[in-house]
Image (cartoon, helix red, strand yellow):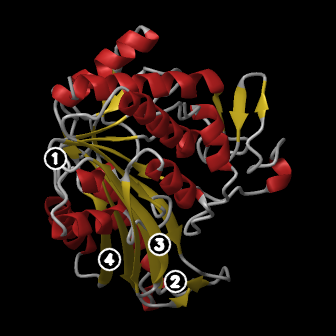
Amino acid sequence: MLDPVTFARDLIRCPSVTPEEGGALQLLQETLEGMGFKCQRLVFSEEGTPDVDNLYARYGDSAPNFCFAGHTDVVPVGLQSEWTVDPFAAEVKDGVLFGRGAADMKGAIAAFASATKRFLDDGAPKGSISFLITGDEEGPSINGTKKVLQWMVENGEQIDMCIVGEPTNPTELGEMVKIGRRGSMNSILTVKGTQGHVAYPHLADNAAHRLVQMLDALTANPLDEGNDHFQASSLQITSIDIGNPTENVIPGEAEARFNIRFNDMHTSETLSGWIRETLDAAADGTPYDLSIRVSGESFVFPPGELSKLISDACETVVGQRPELSTTGGTSDARFIKDHCPVAEFGLISQTMHKVDERTLVDDINKLSEIYEHILRGFFR
């Protein structure tokens, strides 16, 4: 048997801080190959970004193909002096596993593998099981899942249903499944004015004043009220920078940054048009520069076969049916959605990216049971 807690500890001991592989993918590959998987290590690169190692593994060669997706890369530990344990020692104290990646998401990957091992020990499925594991989820997400999916299309690899093991549960296992995500776009607005002396404002044009007027226009009214699957879209100003080192100079340039998390009532294209129209009206001829970067579009898979498989498994193992939600940030599910139905379900999210990241040992074991029930339900 493959013990999920032991395997999670082994994975945590691999210091795979983005973009370093740290031995985690190699360990997972060797484990899956021992179970009969055919593994492909895929290294992708792009100018201006570090090379990233990824893993695609498949057991079987026929349809349907059920995929477990996730990432072995983790965020930096931050101030190690604030940790009460070694972030990569994978210590267990009083039934709690500590370490960077325990919750996000090496615990889930260990649960993926152990569930698959038990399932395969009962015989090969009528179909295939695959693992799509990247080392670039916590980084720029350029050389990871998106490029693996492109490689799969080029090589005739099709997945039919997918679970991403992100930590989706707020406080207890079985509480929440993500059936979609809001879109995300980041903008930088730079407003031009005329620098001058504060005592002679008629000889200057204050860029800060212009910027405030334009930001007020963007935030004056809500974007929407939300719908059955999504909370309301939200525009949040994240930074205002004047760069003025003195008190007696009217700034000639001012910059602001803002993020929009949007539901499926919008697209990045419609929102980009609305931003420019709003700024043009508020600027009243003031010159400005605007750059927009889209991290992902909104998407949702309404309740169906996949969400029922997860909900039934949760009810069997932990005695409750989870809420079907679209809250939170983005994940690699935003890429997978274009290829097959996808949902996210993993451990508890309270300590991800924090000092002393941790998860209950019992939760890893139960998550492995849930994944096993999902496999048995899918291949029934």
Query: Label 1: which residue?
Result: 62
> SS class of the residue under badge 3?
strand
Mark 2 touches mark 4? (CB < 8 Å) = no
Mark 3 touches mark 1? (CB < 8 Å) = no
Q: Upstream in the sequence, badge 3 or badge 2?
A: 3
Q: Upstream in the sequence, badge 2 or badge 4?
A: 2
Query: Label 2: which residue?
Result: 251
Q: Upstream in the sequence, badge 4 or badge 1?
A: 1
Disc 4 marks a residue whose amino acid type is: Ser
Disc 1 marks a residue whose amino acid type is: Ser
Residue at the location (55% across, 69% down)? Answer: 19
Residue at the location (73% across, 42% down)? Answer: 90
Taking the image as drawn, is residue 168 in sight?
Answer: no
Q: Upstream in the sequence, badge 3 or badge 1?
A: 3
Which one is nearer the viewer's eye here, 16 or 368? 368
- Circle 3 or circle 1, nearest the eye: 1
Disc 1: CA contacts within 10 A as few (<14), some (14-19) or many (>=20): few
Query: Label 3: which residue?
Result: 52
